[in-house]
Image: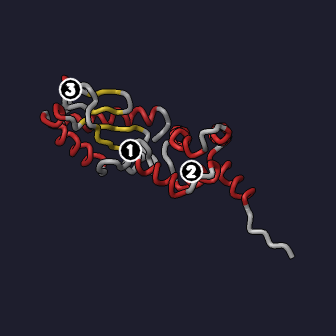
Amino acid sequence: MSISTDNWEQVEAAAKASLGDEIVQFIAQCRQEDAGADSHLVAVLHRVQGHFGYLGEEHLDAVAQLLQVPAAKVAGVASFYHYFRLKPRGRFLLSVCMGTACYVKGAERVAQRVMDELGITWGETSKDGLFTLDPSRCLGTCGLAPVVMVEDEVHGNVTPDQVPAILEQYRHRAREQGHA
């Protein structure tokens, strides 16, 4: 009687299914290079996050399997770099600049109003899935302090009282695009 504990075909198929053809092909290209698969780990994680918007446990496991890199290393890299998100982010990334100029001109009050309006804190996503709140060290627009950036749009000289209207602008946009 022959007993086999090797289920690589099943593991590989599940990993490929969770990442999709484009990412699987990218991983295959990375594995063919002489540098070693783990040297491509950050690039692969960037590609996965770009596609899915975050790095879920299923994604991390699939990357580990297909790159043949220990899962602990993949999780360690994903959690070490600030750029990587381990939870889904909202439709709109909202950043409040907390740099010196913005802070001095009231960014902390603006950020608190955003948190109060959305019911979240730094790094969290609103319950409606529209906004993820991130602090920013500096957005390079000090003359407009305090600054709120939503996706690539800069809102300058923001007061706490302006926050509800800014949020409503993006809620309206999401409704028009069928996202809420």
For the point 55% across and 42% down, the residue is 39
For the point 87% across and 76% down, the residue is 1
SS of the residue under disc 1:
loop
Residue 142 tag number: 3
The picture places residue 117, in percent across and down from the top left corner, at: 27, 46
For the point 45% across and 41% down, the residue is 180
Residue at the far bottom in the pictured view: 1
The picture places residue 7, in percent across and down from the top left corner, at: 73, 62
Reading the image, the residue beneath label 1 is: 82
Q: Amino acid at mark 3?
A: Cys
Reading the image, the residue beneath label 2 is: 59
| Front residue of 147 and 77 | 77
Comes first in the chain, label 2 or label 3 = 2
The picture places residue 43, in percent across and down from the top left corner, at: 53, 38
SS of the residue under disc 3:
helix
Disc 3 crowd, CA 10 A, few/some/many (<14, 14-19, 20+): some
Q: Amino acid at mark 1?
A: His
SS of the residue under disc 2:
helix
